[in-house]
Amino acid sequence: MHDAGPFENVRTGLARAIEREILQHLQALAADGTETAIDLRSLPMSAADRAELDAALGRGEVSAKLSTMGESEVWETRFPGVWWVRHCGRDGRVIAEQVEIALTPEILKADIADVRAAAMRLRDHLAAREPE
Amino acid sequence: MTLLDFARGPAIDAALIVFVFGIAWRLTWLLFLPHSVDFSPPRPRAPGRIAGAAKGFIRHMWPASAYAGRTMFGVINSYVFHIGLAIVVLGFAEHVLFIRDLTGFTWATLPTGIITVVAVVTLAALVVQLMRRLFDPVLKLISTAGDYWAWFVTTLPVATGIATVSHLWLRYEDLLAIHILSVCLFLISFPFGKLMHAFIVFITRSQTGITYSRRGAEI
Amino acid sequence: MEDWSPEAGTVGEALTRQGVSRRALLKYGSYLATLMALPPTAGKAIAQSLAKAKRQSVIYISFQECTGCLESLTRSFSPSIEDMIFNLISLDYQETLQAAAGEAAEKARQDAMAANKGKYVVVVDGSVPTADNGVYSTIGGKTNVEILKETVADAMAVLSVGTCASFGGLPYANPNPTGAVPVSALVTDKPVINVSGCPPVPEVIAGTIAYIVTFGKLPPLDRHNRPTPFFGDSIHDRCYRRPFYDKGLFAKAFDDEGARNGWCLYELGCKGPITYNSCATVKWNGGTSYPIQSGHSCLGCSEPNFWDLGGFYRPLPDPTDKRPAAVGAAAVAGAAVGIATAAAARSRKRKATHEGGPSK
């Protein structure tokens, strides 16, 4: 969370530790489907650490952009099941960032309440078209 | 008013007033006490008063050979904590800020890591000194409550100071308040007990040097 | 088809009405989890809890204040995710923001209190003057003391926003001509949460309210009744300049070489070691910076009495109540007593010598 100062270019080794933690979680996901997440903003990572982790995890087959209350980016890393989720506010600054170890990231799934509201909206939309 | 407000405010103010009053009282009293005049003529080649005083003071900085064996450990241990105290009190940046606020004087300071090491060694030497006082039969016999109190009010600031810099156990504002209050206790106790030796030692050792060098003896 | 409309009066219903999806709420939940240092998987639970929660009725009253706390909350993020807070609450009364004025405004306050009896949260900013029967701040002819007493009577809890409401703040500073007191001095029968700071970090104000709405209870509080998720760490413990403090490398003056190297600002009066707030982690202006990062020592603005800590540029070791005249007088008095004591000793010796017998 340090955005300034002389430490941003220093690699503290935290990226390596996080990679090992990701491995443990990925093994748990593979074994019995346990889903977890690691909050990157709560750790004292420098910019260099974050870049090192990003380079180590790389990019996979899936990437998604969300436009809700600002932009968010979700991509699968080159390790299926390991997703990078970055939330930005409407002013463009990063407000939350995590590595999710799951079959699908929570934020990509449609919420049942939204689905219900959508069903009602679609019904009303079709009903309004009926008189034709 | 928080504990820190009290420690930095009325407490240290009162302690400094009592300290200054006490030092002025004790020293003035000492210097104006009646003393006997030596009517005998000085021995030939006896040094003058200033030379006698200086030589006497320096000679007393190390035990005479007859006593060196018995007292060497105590002498060295005492030097360790006295020098340690001086380094910590005068070399630590935060202390120099306090002194600068009171007197306007300031000087270059030592890295905090060095101060911490010296402070821990000083604390250890102080504890060893207490052990000596408790377990050496002669020392134990002649020790008074004043001796133990002087040890306590000197060691408490060192211990609380280490805890404050290292942020041990309590929140910093409480640690700093307790440290400042322990220094207040030290300042209030100082003029009225054994700690006055810090000023008096310069007078007494020099006087011994003057008195006996006039008579041709080096004591 | 069944009616799947969300329950009226809930946060979920408010969001659906505005076309804000549950996915947006989940994103907000993740943000809150990070802000409150909760595990990232708590984001989903927070979002679900918020959707079902009733919009919290809030009555915001302002006393001896500069409006900086409200400005902090409403102007800092424009627009951004923190705006969500206004979906979580129903701000039933707020003098600066509301359209109603005069008697219509007073009626709005009375109506909101009656409609949400026992369930509304009172947010107060500004200290309460008590000198001369509280005449130094009145609204609509009523003193702040009266308005406070009347408004909190049926409240669920009180949030003192800003150092003035929490601890008295600037009006309380020496010599306190209006007899200003903190809200907690007058409200003793309801829970009072202090969200201090001059002003408080906007995310902290919003986060505290979000905590209450999400979990349906008050957050854990520290010794000054401030929520520990936001006031648990001191600035010093999270400051990026801490390694310089630990080494003993201090800036001696603003813009000297040490300052330009980003060294610790302890000698320039930084109160970071005794100040508890989120400035060093959450920072200001949407995470842009905080005073120390911008080169200025921490003022200690979220602590009680910070105006009277001795001076913003006087470091912590400096005594605050120096009286050089008293010290000088003590020296003179000590010398006088010393001479008197020595004179007494001399006179005893003289008497002993003149009364015969060997001189002592």
Image: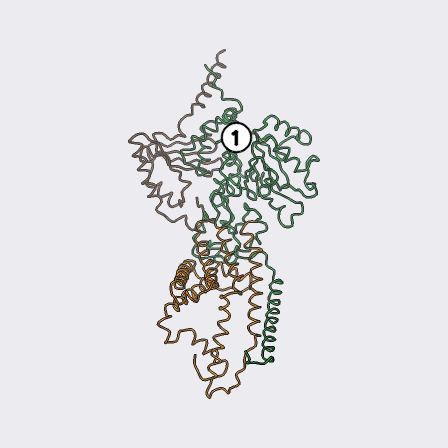
Chain colours: A brown, B orange, C green
Where does residue C314 sit, x and y in percent of width and height? Answer: 55, 56
Q: Is residue C21 left or right of residue B132?
A: right
Chain under numbered label 1: C
Residue at the spot 69% in from the left edge and 42% down from the top edge? C136
Where does residue B210 sit, x and y in percent of width and height? Answer: 49, 80
Work out which residue is located at the far top of the displayed protein and give it.
A131
Q: Residues within 10 Å of mark 1 (few under 14, many from 20)?
A: many
Question: Against C10, is C259 above or below?
Answer: below
Q: Nearer the viewer, residue B9 or A94?
A: B9
Where does residue A39 sit, x and y in percent of width and height? Answer: 40, 38
**Which picture quadrant has residue C349?**
bottom right
Q: Nearer the viewer, residue B103 or C44?
A: B103
Which amino acid type corresponds to the residue marked 1 in the rendered image? Leu
Q: Quadrant of the N terminus of chain A?
A: top left
Q: Nearer the viewer, residue C104 or B178?
A: B178
**Which picture quadrant has residue C331?**
bottom right
Question: Against C2, is A36 above or below?
Answer: below
Total count of labels: 1
Work out which residue is located at the far bottom of the displayed protein and give it.
B44
Q: Nearer the viewer, residue A49 or C10?
A: C10
Judging from the image, what secondary structure is the residue with disc 1 in? helix
**Which picture quadrant has residue A3?**
top left
User: Badge 1 is on which residue?
Assistant: C88
Where does residue B169 sit, x and y in percent of width and height? Answer: 44, 49
